[in-house]
Image (cartoon, rainbow, N blue to C red):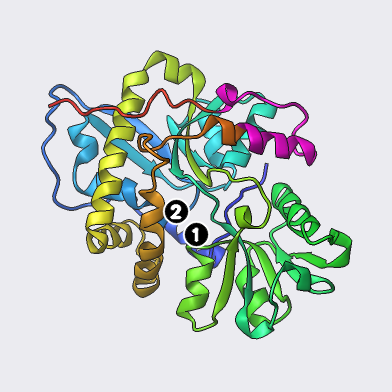
Amino acid sequence: MKHGRIPAIALAVVLLALSLGLAACGEKSEDTTGGEAQPISLTLDFYPNPDHAGIYMAQKLGYFEEAGLDVSINAPSDPAAPLKLVAAGRSDLGISYEPEVALAHEEDLGVVAIAAIVNRPLTSMIWLKKSAIKGVGELKGKTIATAGIPYQEAFLKTILSRVKLTPEEVKAVNVGFGLLPALVGGSAQAMLGGYSNVEGVALRERGKEPVVTPVDQLGVPTYDELVLVANKKMLEGEPERFRLFIAALERGTDAAVEQPKVATEALLEANSGLEPKLTEAEMTATLPLLAARTGGEPYGYMDPAAWTTFAGWMRDNGLIESLPSAEELLSNAYLSGEIPE
């Protein structure tokens, strides 16, 4: 499987981040649960960035400690690592993506999503205002930079089909991590794979006036961009440990929304390779996404019907062979946990 996240900075910065001490410091509350803290490991989807604001605020403010948890946070050396580590029992939790969870089920990895961290697509089609492109229909004959990820290639096919275009009528070029250079440098007139809250923000901060449209507004079924995944067998053995983690994460997320400057500080402490001004701008764009709830549902809720629809889209596009039930991919049973007094 390939990773679904395309960063706004060079891979070298990612590798630098791997060597950092990822546990944030700061004022922490006392553990009120009593007894020895339960260890729990989390593997991020990528280097620490604003998508992880709730995690680092929970660490900084001591919410994990209050929940009786000793949380270790790790960045992956391989972007595909989180699901594999969780499946192998080498990491208790991982951050991944709804499409990757469906692919993992196809491979019988024994993992399940237990909370949505971002409950809507961030992956976007992006072009610059100066290009004079008014809509997807005007991409005919244009070069579109992509990351070469199979399910994002299917995104492109779906997006183009809405305006009666085929992939053969555009020039899709796999640029890997080079999405921004391709767009800004002019070798591509549009890009697919960047995030609205990362690449979109980076372009705005550089004065490039991007036109950013998330893929669910272009015909792709909605999905949860970032999810927390766990090993099914481990969940059965220690369900309360995972409930406590999500409860503390919810507190950290709410605190980040209320104190964005502190959240930015926590993130910069975790990853000194980030550029402060850009990180602050990305944080402003990201926090409302992290705090979003589905109707009256609890924090982290994943809509089973939406997951079934998206899995059907994946099957119809040849990404998976069989149609899994939502229950095979996700569980909302670990939400609404409470931290003991």
- Distance, label 1 to label 2, CA atoms, is 7 Å
Closer to the camera, 84 or 57? 57
The image quadrant that residue 326 belongs to is top right
318 falls in the magenta region: yes
Q: Secondary structure at mark 2?
A: helix
Residue 252 appears left or right of 19: left
| Residue 119 place in picture, x, y as percent | 48, 45
Q: Which residues are magenta?
A: 308-329
Task: Judge the density around disc 2: few (<14), some (14-19), many (≥20) Cα neighbours within 10 Å.
Answer: some
In this view, the residue in front, 123 or 57, is: 123
- Asked whether disc 1 touches disc 2, contact meaning CB atoms under 8 Å apart, the reply is yes
For label 1, the residue is 14
Instruction: Give residue 18's mark.
Output: 2
Q: Secondary structure at mark 1?
A: helix
Q: Quadrant of the C terminus?
A: top left
Q: Amino acid at mark 1?
A: Val
